[in-house]
Amino acid sequence: MSISYWLDQSASSKKNYDVVVVGGGISGLSSAYWLHKKDPQLKIAIIDKGHLSSGATGRNAGFITCGSVEHFNRLNERWGAQLAKEIWQFSEDNLDLLKSELNLGDKEDFQTKGSFSLASTENEFLELKKSAQLMEDFNIQVESLDEKQIQSRLNADGFVGGIKYLSDASIHPRKLCETLLASMPNVDFFPNTELFKISSSGDQRILFTNQHEFHCQFVVLATNGYLPLINPYFEDLVSATRGQILITEKLPLFLEGPCYANFVLDYFRQLPSGELIIGGFRQLEKDTEVGYSDHTSKVIQNALEKFINTHLPAAQNKSITHRWSGVMGFSFDGQPFIGVLPSDPQIFFLGGFTAHGLGLAFHTGKCLSQLIFGEEFPEFISAKRK
């Protein structure tokens, strides 16, 4: 994050706030929401170098899925049964909080149709069935499907079976952010306002941007994959990772719900208006799908089209209307984190959503507000975890 001397207008305008949140995506808005709810008298500003949800939030596929980047059986193997259940419950609570706090509906294209994980090989199907059995043991709602059920309910070819998580949802990410911001009429949002330095003056923190100079008591850094550009402390916590997506013209509805395939690496769903959105295949260029460029590549885009033409006959050879990529923040262990900068107790942060920001960030923002107010929060999302 840098700014040319010629474009620096920060000294021309000073703004005073109690809290400044850096990042106008789902994590920044969620943090502001819960801080505002805890203390409506707080004067809060949200700043973003682009516009509302212009980062990863506005560049994902709109899945609100429970769990994390791994199937439940792998969570169980890595973290143990008790913590695996806690991690899963955290994401279920995230969806429950979104529904109870924001009254989501047609305006946000909000749907609760569950989500499918599909297996193209018997080995993957065995792992999915193992995961489903573990989930049932923990009273997590899940359904197993064979090849014929996949074909009849999803019109999808080339899958030997799968499982369905019954509680998952999907949404229009930008409209979700608009609803969140509208629920905080006393919170100010500053688009096209890029941070390039934070300094201290007594108990005040000063944020220098290309538009204004913000003075505040506390700062919340909510830029996820871009955190290392703000402070080198984050280089060991989160890495910038690119994901690519395309979307087709409108089609007759043929999918029962959102789907994952290939061990959650690839994903697709239909919007309520009929367009098919599909993303993934990062594994094909894993070494280069890093950093902060938002370009697309022929290799991955061709793979997305090939997937459609191979597995989804209802969408074969349809027109592609948009192609894009987005920069995600992958944490060191796949779980989100919250914390306070060791070098400055007035600068807080959250991030590391590892491609599951919509499924984790609202609850994580609530936990950040608990940290700021000195309340307890789940240990597994602490940046200090071992």
Image (cartoon, rainbow, N blue to C red):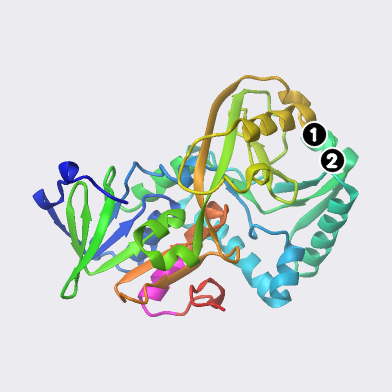
Residue plotted at (32% across, 48% down) = 48
Classify 10 Å Cα crowding around label 1: few (below 14), some (14-19), many (20 and above): many
Q: Would you say the residues marked 2 and 1 are in contact, meaning their CB atoms lie under 8 Å apart?
A: yes
Total numbered circles: 2
Disc 1 marks which residue? 156
Give percent across and percent down for residue 385: 54, 77
356 or 197, which lies in front?
197
Judged left or right of residue 25, residue 268 is: right
377 or 212, which lies in front?
212
Disc 2 marks which residue? 159
Please tell me the numbered disc located at residue 143. Answer: none
Residue plotted at (17% across, 55% down) = 213
Q: Quadrant of residue 35?
A: bottom left
Can see residue 254?
no
- Amino acid, disc 1: Ala
Q: Is residue 373 magenta?
A: yes
- For mark 2, give the secondary structure: loop
Give percent across and percent down for residue 375: 42, 79
- Amino acid, disc 2: Phe
- For mark 1, give the secondary structure: loop
Q: Which residues are magenta?
A: 365-375
Give percent across and percent down for residue 209: 22, 51
